[in-house]
Amino acid sequence: RLIEIINIPFPDRSQMAHRNINVVQIRRYSDPSDRSRPHLVETLRHYVNKTIEMEERRSAALACIAVEKFRLSHSGQLPQSLADLVPVIRANPIIDPFDGQSLRYQILKSANTIDATPIGYRIYSIGGNGHDDLGVEPDYYTIPVTPSGDDVGITIFH
């Protein structure tokens, strides 16, 4: 089933893959002598999640290109939402491959309360927890990795 799922579009692909991995995990408990199944389950879950993450980053990169095209054609102004990119820059909205909704978009402002000029933006997808962590990704630079959020995206500063 997992091999057949590869050709199904997101987000159905990720949901079906996780459901089938859970089936494999449940069967693990029905046969305690099967020592390879726990390793198989975790390996499958890891690679399915990495595949989804790559799709999320690709979608975010496409959205960044669309935002930059918008910015260049609007005297440096950022769109207020990704919906502003359709249909002028893109024919269709850019979809979050994890949940099928629009990617999330945040305009980043200066911390200086006097100057509220945008300093960049963040485009992101929700991560494996299915929760919008407001663009916060895991901190891969600490040991151990800090799971403060698991969103996946790109931040652009101007």
Image (cartoon, rainbow, N blue to C red):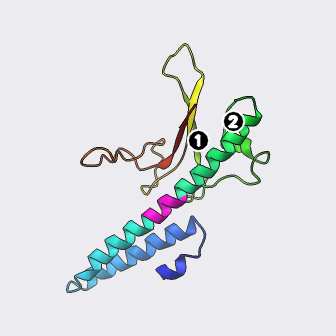
Please state the horizontal and vertical placement of residue 72, each as a whole percent of the image.
72, 35
Could you tell me what secondary structure mostly forms the magenta stretch? helix
Q: Nearer the viewer, residue 34 or 47?
A: 47
Q: Which mark is residue 132?
A: none
The three-letter code of the residue at mark 2 reads Pro
Q: Vertically, is 113 above or below 105?
A: above
- Residue 25: quarter of image: bottom left
Tell me: residue 119, above or below residue 87: above
- Mark 2 nearby-residue class (10 Å; few <14, some 14–19, many ≥20): some
Q: Which residue is mark 2?
A: 79
Q: Is residue 149 left or right of residue 28?
A: right
- Residue 133 visible? The answer is yes
Residue placed furthest toward the right: 88
The answer for how far apart the CA atoms under marks 1 and 2 are is: 10 Å
Span colored in magenta: 50-55
Q: Magenta span has 52?
A: yes
Q: Earlier in the sequence, mark 1 or mark 2?
A: 2
User: Which residue is painted at 58% across and 76% down in the image?
Assistant: 7
Label drawn at residue 105: 1
- Farthest residue, direction top: 114
Task: Pinpoint residue 110: horizontal percent, then vertical percent.
Answer: 52, 23
Q: Residue furthest left?
A: 33
Which residue lies at the image location 72% right of the left edge and 39% below the top edge?
70
Amino acid at circle 1: Tyr
Please state the horizontal and vertical placement of residue 9, each as a whole percent of the image. Answer: 61, 69
Q: Is residue 40 left or right of residue 7?
A: left
CB-based contact (under 8 Å), mark 1 and mark 2: yes
Helix or strand or loop: what does disc 1 sit on? strand
| Residue ID at (59%, 74%) | 8
